[in-house]
């Protein structure tokens, strides 16, 4: 069966085995829940089932066009089936943002389903303690009576309210039990299917396919790392050099030939970790915004190049995907510059272009501060609700010059706005999965789907706080051990190579192709004035 979430729908709904699963659920008296399934899976399940279905926690697509909700045509099919749609309280399925929804909007979803399907086919499926953000007025399980009171104020009578509260679900359960009774003399379905070629589960022994051993996984990891450049999207060593040694890399204690206990990075460790290409962070602190951020950016870019030249037996500067592959084959580590973040261009397209000419190959649109044209993930106040018009121009100019767009650190709405307009795939240079750790620096599943459509890549961060939502309890093996662990989870050699570096190289090449496609387009020439509250050192009468 196809889920609603992945971009690729492998089965166009239910397979023949999926239809058999539905029939066996009918025979057993198991309720069939169509939340989370694709629209085609909904339609096909409704054609096959003899019993009424439920949507245990879904809302109305017509009011919020999220793939987890139910379109009107399927609401009508559900009514014909006698099923029930139990409205979800998650802000993102009620409103267009997970940051806010209201009890009134939940009531509107209930009333819409009542209007389209009928009062007999709507209920409540809150998803409390399963989601991060619920509507104002429905903050916890004590608030159900407030919702019922609001529906009464909107004109629902006592009988209708009882149906929504529970009678509709009880009717569906009795309907499923009746079907079970009617099918009690039917033999159980007895059909097996082989796992799909990309299955990663632990059923291998049943099908005489042995699990990969530890030794085999370690050998595969070494093979992958010897054939594919491991591309790390973000390393803050240059800032540590500034903080500890004022960028004076000639100091004996600053040598990368010697492992230092306060650092994660040295030449020996990079080689042991089989790193093939490293994006070094040209980090510019937010405190420099409207002051001397460009100076910081230039100094750190200079430092990255000086480190590369000092240790030229180990490193070589890379500016293209082809450079990475060539340098990796030569036995060296490719050095690249990633500018963190967008405030370091001081809202100037000219500075953006010059950063590219100096060798910067990605720009993180924001760090932990908003820019005059894009919202960051970190501040509570999001003044722009994503990108401004000038921010959209920044994205277009990055496409034109071939600069990779890095969406780590930006707000969810900035992510969505960027993904809606960029012609080139994006990167997240150091972010992880929000569904596993609900930190604002991570990427929600709905945005992951948009990234897949964009053909971008999310490069997983190793910071404990973004992995396990705690500073002290995440676990991580060394890089080869990580790749071996992924192999033991069922990833093939081809998949491991994509994770290690091939995905980033693909994104890089596609950004270069967009640059080539746009080569005849003139540079964007737009200026904006600094915000009124800027405290910078700008010359008078100069925007």
Image (tube, rainbow, N blue to C red):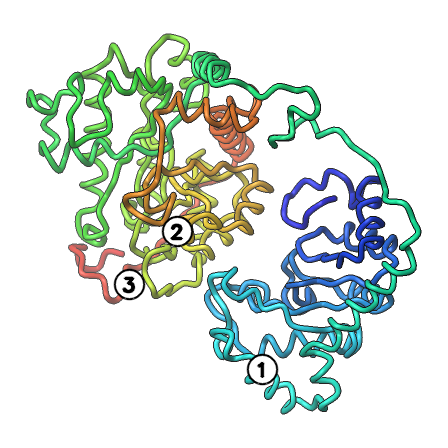
Residue plotted at (86% across, 42% down): 189
Q: Nearer the viewer, mark 3 or mark 2?
A: 2
Q: Position of residue 250 (x, y in %)?
A: 9, 21
Q: Quadrant of the N terminus?
A: top right
Instruction: Give the answer, above or below, for where 286 lies relative to 460.
Output: below
* Residue at image mark 3: 531
Mark 3: which secondary structure? loop
Using the rendered view, name the quadrant where residue 307 is placed: top left
**Could you say which is closer to the camera, residue 195 or residue 300?**
195
**Could you say which is closer to the camera, residue 88 or residue 528?**
88
Q: Position of residue 527 (x, y in %)?
A: 35, 54
Mark 1: which secondary structure? helix
Q: Few, some or many C-alpha atoms within 10 Å of disc 3 (few <14, some 14-19, many ≥20)?
A: few
Callout 3 touching callout 2 (CB < 8 Å) = no
* Residue at image mark 1: 147
Q: Mark 2 or mark 1: which comes first in sequence?
A: 1
Left or right, 498 with reference to 53:
left
Mark 2: which secondary structure? loop
Callout 1 touching callout 3 (CB < 8 Å) = no
Instruction: Give the answer, above or below, for where 500 lies relative to 407.
Output: above
Q: Quadrant of the C terminus?
A: bottom left
* Label 1 to label 3: alpha-carbon separation: 43 Å
Q: Nearer the viewer, mark 1 or mark 3?
A: 1
* Residue at image mark 2: 410
Q: Few, some or many C-alpha atoms within 10 Å of disc 1 (few <14, some 14-19, many ≥20)?
A: some
**Could you say which is closer to the camera, residue 111 or residue 486?**
486
Using the rendered view, name the quadrant where residue 159 is placed: bottom right
Q: Which mark is residue 311?
A: none
Q: Position of residue 439 (x, y in %)?
A: 39, 53
Instruction: Give the answer, above or below, for where 484 lies relative to 538.
Output: above
């Amino acid at each position: 069966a196809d889920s609603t979430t992945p971009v690729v729908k492998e089965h166009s709904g239910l397979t023949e085995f999926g239809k058999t699963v539905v029939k066996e659920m009918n025979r057993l008296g198991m309720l069939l829940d169509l939340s989370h399934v694709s629209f085609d899976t909904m339609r096909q399940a409704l054609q096959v089932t003899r019993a009424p279905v439920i949507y245990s926690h879904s809302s109305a697509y017509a009011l919020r066009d999220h793939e987890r909700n139910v379109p009107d045509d399927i609401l009508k099919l559900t009514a014909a089936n006698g099923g029930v749609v139990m409205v979800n309280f998650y802000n993102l399925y009620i409103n267009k943002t997970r940051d806010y929804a209201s009890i009134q909007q939940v009531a509107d979803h209930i009333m819409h389903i009542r209007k389209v399907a009928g009062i007999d086919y709507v209920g409540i499926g809150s998803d409390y303690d399963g989601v991060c953000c619920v509507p104002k007025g429905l903050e916890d399980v004590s608030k159900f009576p407030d919702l019922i009171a609001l529906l009464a104020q909107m004109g629902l009578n006592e009988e209708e309210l009882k149906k929504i509260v529970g009678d509709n679900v009880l009717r569906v359960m009795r309907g499923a039990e009746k079907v079970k009774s009617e099918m009690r003399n039917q033999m159980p379905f007895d059909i097996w299917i082989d796992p799909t070629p990309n299955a990663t589960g632990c059923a291998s022994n049943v099908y005489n396919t042995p699990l990969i051993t530890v030794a085999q996984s370690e050998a595969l990891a070494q093979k992958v790392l010897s054939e594919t450049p491991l591309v790390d999207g973000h390393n803050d060593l240059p800032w540590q050099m500034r903080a500890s040694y004022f960028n004076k890399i000639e100091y004996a204690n600053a040598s990368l030939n010697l492992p230092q206990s306060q650092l994660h990075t040295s030449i020996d460790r990079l080689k042991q970790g089989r790193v093939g290409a490293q994006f070094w962070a040209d980090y510019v602190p937010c405190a420099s915004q409207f002051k001397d951020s460009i100076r910081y950016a230039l100094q750190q870019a200079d430092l990255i190049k000086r480190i590369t030249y000092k240790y030229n037996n180990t490193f070589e500067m890379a500016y293209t995907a082809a450079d990475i592959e060539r340098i990796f084959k030569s036995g060296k580590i490719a050095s690249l510059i990633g500018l963190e973040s967008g405030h370091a261009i001081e809202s100037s397209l000219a500075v953006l272009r010059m950063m590219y000419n100096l060798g910067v190959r990605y720009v993180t649109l924001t760090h932990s501060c908003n820019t005059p044209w894009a919202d960051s993930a970190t501040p509570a106040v999001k003044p722009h609700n994503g990108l401004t018009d000038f921010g959209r121009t920044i994205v277009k100019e990055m496409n034109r010059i071939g600069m990779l767009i890095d969406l780590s650190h930006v707000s969810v709405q900035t992510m969505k706005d960027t993904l809606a307009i960029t012609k080139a795939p994006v990167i997240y240079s150091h972010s992880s999965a929000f569904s596993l750790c609900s930190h604002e620096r991570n990427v929600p599943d709905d945005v992951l789907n948009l990234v897949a459509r964009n053909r971008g890549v999310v490069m997983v961060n190793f910071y404990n706080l973004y992995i396990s939502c705690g500073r002290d309890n995440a676990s991580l093996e060394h890089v080869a051990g990580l790749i071996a662990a992924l192999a033991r989870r069922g990833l093939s050699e081809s998949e491991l190579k994509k994770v290690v570096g091939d995905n980033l190289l693909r994104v890089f090449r596609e950004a270069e192709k967009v640059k080539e496609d746009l080569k005849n387009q003139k540079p964007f020439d737009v200026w904006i004035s600094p915000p009124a509250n800027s405290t910078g050192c700008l010359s008078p009468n100069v925007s």
